[in-house]
Image: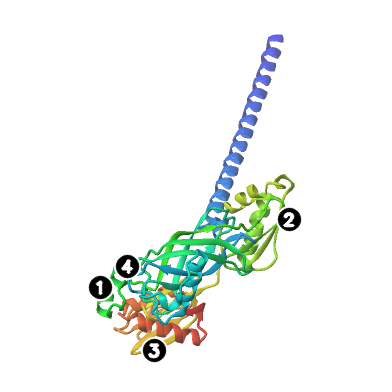
């Protein structure tokens, strides 16, 4: 009996153990299924994130800059000497009077009529002072003739001050003129047929030259970023969407309410306490974040060269176009559109001058259509002007 009970108990225990094992196995299977499903959901979510991520992005420093960190333009007047008969004529006082004054400062007294030949030229100087430029750094100078000099090739600029809008001297310029090809160094201009033989990069005006590293910075423009509690970032191309994205990006990386968009071109950034006194590190961190900028649709037409530059967001409404025997129809495409006699399917060419596109087509499709029917770029430009006038081209049209 005891054995039976023991065996029965053993059977019951074994049965219960099996049930426990089976129940545990079921739990394990359920957990495994949940884990697999969770993994599938996780994988699916990750795929959504991957495919929802921006196709392309750029650094913040390429779309925005710190307010105050800007270039400053400098101008000045100077005299170029040592020209080989290509300088100002004897009648030009623009170069004679200044050179007389310069000689008097070193103890040489002359009159304007005493300076013979065409070896000097009066020039207007321009230079750009970059932000954070320090004393002793060098800048490039551009020199352009003011009088009747025909070439600056081979000349040397004598020391001339470069001033800012406040009339203060920020740099001193001096050095040899460079950047003028040999073919245009004579006193007479080259004929058109000879000028056409020169490389495109050499077709320069001989009356304009450069002095590489010819200016020495003498005065600095102070800009202390580390003392600021707020920064203002200016977008290079103002856009409300880009400004909002930039503020959102900064808040995601620095904390909520660290940045806000003031308008389409400015984002205000509050310097966190951890970056106070070390704003340069904060600016470096923000500049290297990646953002997907937005922009308005734009089409640029260069009538001289026949070049058409367009963005990917350009759209065209349904419209019919006829230009010099070319007929283009842009229609809305129905879901079950079938080819019928006299009706064109998208991308189909009826004859040598007809091409049809669906409504909302990219401008790229229009260009491809023109290429298929062998139209010229001139025809394309004229058509785009007419489409814009008709209100069917949803983009800004820039004509150059």
Task: Return the residue at label 3.
Answer: 322
Task: Return the residue at label 4.
Answer: 181
* In the image: residue 137, left or right of residue 207: right
From the image, state whether disc 1 or disc 4 is nearer to you: 4
> Which residue lies at the image location 73% right of the left edge and 53% below the top edge?
229
Distance CA(mark 1)–CA(mark 4): 13 Å
**Residue 266 visible somewhere in the drawing:** yes
Q: Nearer the viewer, residue 262 or 81?
A: 81
Label drawn at residue 378? none
> Which residue lies at the image location 46% right of the left edge and 69% below the top edge?
79
From the image, state whether disc 1 or disc 2 is nearer to you: 1
Q: Position of residue 245 (x, y in %)?
A: 62, 60
Q: Nearer the viewer, residue 300 or 27?
A: 300
Quarter of the N terminus within the rendering? top right
Distance CA(mark 1)–CA(mark 3): 40 Å
Residues at marks 1 and 3 touching, judged by CB atoms closer than 8 Å = no
Quarter of the C terminus within the rendering? bottom left
Answer with mark 1 or mark 4, whichever residue precedes in sequence: 4
């Amino acid at each position: 009996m005891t054995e039976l009970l023991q065996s029965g108990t053993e059977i019951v225990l074994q049965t219960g153990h099996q049930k426990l094992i089976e129940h545990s196995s079921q739990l394990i299977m359920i957990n495994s299924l949940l884990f697999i499903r969770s993994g599938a959901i996780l994988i699916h979510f990750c795929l959504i994130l991957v495919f929802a991520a921006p196709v392309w992005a750029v650094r913040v420093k390429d779309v925005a800059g710190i307010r105050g960190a800007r270039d400053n333009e400098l101008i000045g007047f100077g005299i170029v000497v040592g020209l080989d008969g290509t300088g100002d004529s004897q009648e030009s006082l623009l170069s004679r009077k200044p050179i007389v004054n310069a000689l008097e400062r070193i103890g040489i007294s002359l009159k304007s009529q005493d300076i013979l030949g065409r070896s000097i030229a009066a020039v207007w100087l321009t230079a750009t002072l970059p932000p954070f430029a320090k004393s002793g750094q060098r800048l490039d100078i551009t020199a352009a003739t003011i009088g009747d000099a025909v070439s600056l090739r081979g000349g040397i600029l004598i020391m001339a001050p470069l001033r800012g809008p406040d009339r203060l001297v920020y740099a001193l310029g001096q050095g040899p003129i460079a950047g003028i090809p040999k073919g245009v160094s004579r006193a007479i201009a080259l004929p058109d047929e000879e000028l056409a033989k020169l490389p495109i990069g050499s077709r320069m005006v001989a009356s304009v030259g450069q002095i590489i590293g010819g200016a020495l910075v003498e005065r600095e423009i102070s800009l202390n970023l580390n003392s600021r509690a707020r920064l203002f970032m200016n977008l290079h191309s103002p856009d409300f969407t880009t400004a909002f994205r930039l503020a959102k990006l900064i808040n995601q990386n620095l904390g909520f309410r660290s940045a806000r968009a003031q308008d389409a071109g400015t984002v205000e950034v509050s310097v966190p306490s951890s970056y106070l006194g070390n704003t340069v590190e904060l600016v470096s961190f923000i500049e290297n974040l990646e953002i997907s900028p937005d922009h308005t649709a734009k089409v640029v037409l260069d009538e001289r060269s026949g070049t058409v530059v367009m963005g990917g967001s350009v759209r065209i409404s349904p419209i019919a176009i006829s230009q010099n025997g070319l007929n283009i129809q842009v229609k809305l495409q129905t879901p079950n559109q079938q080819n019928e006699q006299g009706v064109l399917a998208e991308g189909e060419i009826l004859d040598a001058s007809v091409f049809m596109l669906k409504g909302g087509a990219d401008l790229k499709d229009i260009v491809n259509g023109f290429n298929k029917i062998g139209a010229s770029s001139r025809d394309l430009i004229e058509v785009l002007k007419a489409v814009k006038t008709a209100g069917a081209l949803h983009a800004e049209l820039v004509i150059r």
